Image (spheres, helix red, strand yellow):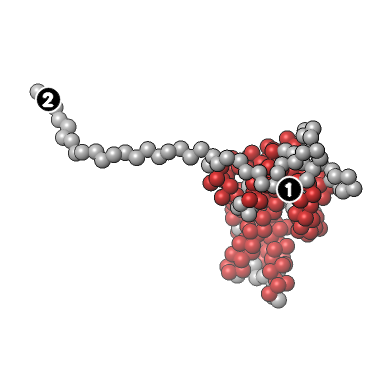
Amino acid sequence: MFKFFSLFLTKMSSRLRRIGYVTKSGLSAKDLHTDAWIVASDIGEKRGSEVDFSDPDDQELVLSKLYSQTRRQTDSRLRSAICIDQDIEGEFKWSERLPASAASDPLISLLEQEVAHEVALSSAVILKSSYSEAAAYVIVLAHFNNEREDVCTYLAISDSTLYKRVASAANHVRVQPSLIDRIERVGVRFMPPPGWQYPVRVEGPVAAKQWGWEF
């Protein structure tokens, strides 16, 4: 099985690299090797038979599951980034809960799923103490059921712009928390005004015209 898995990784190197790029996870093809193995193990356990890495159908199944998992983990990290270094009394810092790179250790990768679940449960507690742009983004995402495409449409911005803004807000709150944290908080009904939709210019009908030399 390991031989076929190795051949699978070599054959699908460009596909793995594309998964890292499309999901904006920052992961390289090599970083996803461990995750691909874990995904294949989960598939085999659920269906009662191991993944055959020489079978094209199984190959596509692993890649599809790997893409979905990587996308979910990337979105989860964005939504939870507001509290990377904001510790709540009696709680561990979120920076201590975050998983290491998937390439660093297979055991850490296995723990990542449990950590993601714990992080999600703590979001409500964090929002009660944070008065920041990052917290506002989390609330806006919640209004749209965490559908980034819908948020982008409402704000009239691209997906990459939303990603950069959320990442910037998360970095800012990490190094410079608000002075009124735990005193004020962003209301759960907060909603920014919609983005400016530029009007589309509609050209009127143009009559046919004969161009020619004038003598």
Residue closest to the far right: 90
Res. 113 visible in picture: yes
- Residue at 19% over, 39% down: 208
Q: Nearest the camera: 96 or 157?
A: 157
Disc 1: which residue: 80
Q: Nearest the camera: 117 or 103?
A: 117
- Mark closer to the chain start, 1 or 2: 1
Q: Percent x, y for residue 117?
A: 76, 57
Instruction: For mark 2, give the secondary structure.
Output: loop
Mark 1 surroundings: few (<14), some (14-19) or many (≥20) residues within 10 A:
many
Q: Percent x, y for residue 110?
A: 78, 59
Q: Percent x, y for residue 33?
A: 70, 56
Q: Nearest the camera: 192 or 151?
A: 192
Quarter of the rendering containing residue 173: top right
Q: Is residue 33 left or right of residue 15?
A: right
* Image quadrant containing the C terminus: top left
Quarter of the rendering containing residue 64: bottom right
Res. 106 visible in picture: no
Label 1 amino acid? Ser
- Residue at 68% over, 42% down: 136
Q: Nearest the camera: 139 or 174?
A: 139
* Placement of 135 over or under 12, stated as above or below: above
- Residue at 70% over, 44% down: 187
* Placement of 148 over or under 11, stated as above or below: above
Q: Percent x, y for residue 144?
A: 61, 51
Disc 2: which residue: 214
Label 2 amino acid? Glu
Instruction: For mark 1, give the secondary structure.
Output: helix
Q: State if disc 2 and disc 1 touch (CB < 8 Å).
A: no
